[in-house]
Amino acid sequence: MKKITTFLIALSCISAANAEFNPFMGEAENQIAFYIGQGVDNGYIVPLPYHPVPFYIAQFQYSQPTTFFKMPARQSLNVAETLGLGKKYGWDWTDFTIPLVLGSGDVALFYGDNWYTGVGAGVGLQAQQNERLGAKLLFEFKLFYGYRINEEWGIELYAQHFSNANTAEENHSYAFFGIGVNHNF
């Protein structure tokens, strides 16, 4: 436990040393992004890349830079649409074609001049509850790796998990792996 605490303190000091620099968007004050993802059928908070299903997500995100405990971060508003196209592993994925809205925050844990990796969390609503997630309320967890191609453009790879955090009886989660394109301005 002592080693983990020391590591986390050192990590926050390294990240805080350059808190004015935001690896997500450089000097820009705004970012828009478009993400697409492939669904997987597993309930882990960090989804594993097996059991792909005919379930997809398209997500539009608007972000602004901020900090989280002196670490570079971004706060975002997201609008997404899930799209199910068939049956697999006992689920009719077409039943889960549902729009989502979400507020989220991402923190860069490690970063360099043009790259970053981190975690994100968010809370939002889906337009209707269903037999997979028995509530409209959703919680999100995300892991990502990003690369800023130049001051205006970047790409990200991500793993994303949505669940209702056991606020309803049914909580089978949605999980995605995907890629995104960012534009900074």
Image (spheres, rainbow, N blue to C red):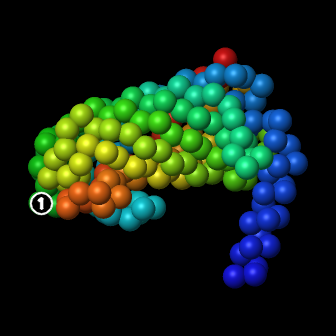
Q: Is residue 166 left or right of residue 33?
A: left
Nearest to the observer: residue 146 or residue 13: 13
Task: Label 1: state its secondary structure.
Answer: loop
Q: Tag 1: Cα neighbours inside 10 Å, few (<14), some, or many (≥20)?
A: few
The percent position of residue 185, horizontal first and vertical second, equals 67, 17
Task: Place residue 24 in its image quadrant.
Answer: top right
Picture residue at 81% right of the left edge, 36% below the top: 21
Q: On screen, 106 above or below 90?
A: above
Nearest to the observer: residue 108 or residue 38: 108
The percent position of residue 12, horizontal first and vertical second, equals 78, 57
The residue tagged 1 is 90
Picture residue at 77% right of the left edge, 46% below the top: 70
Nearest to the observer: residue 150 or residue 61: 61
Q: In this view, does 81 lie to the left or right of 11?
A: left
Q: Is residue 155 left or right of residue 4?
A: left
Residue 40 in sight here: no
Q: In this view, does 169 lie to the left or right of 126?
A: left
Q: On screen, 137 above or below 63?
A: below
Picture residue at 20% right of the left edge, 59% below the top: 170
The three-letter amino acid code for the residue at tag 1 is Gly
Picture residue at 60% right of the left edge, 47% below the top: 145
Residue 74 in sight here: yes
Question: Which residue, as the protein is rendered here, is positioned at the far bottom?
Answer: 1
Question: Which residue, as the protein is rendered here, is positioned at the far top?
Answer: 185
Nearest to the observer: residue 140 or residue 59: 140
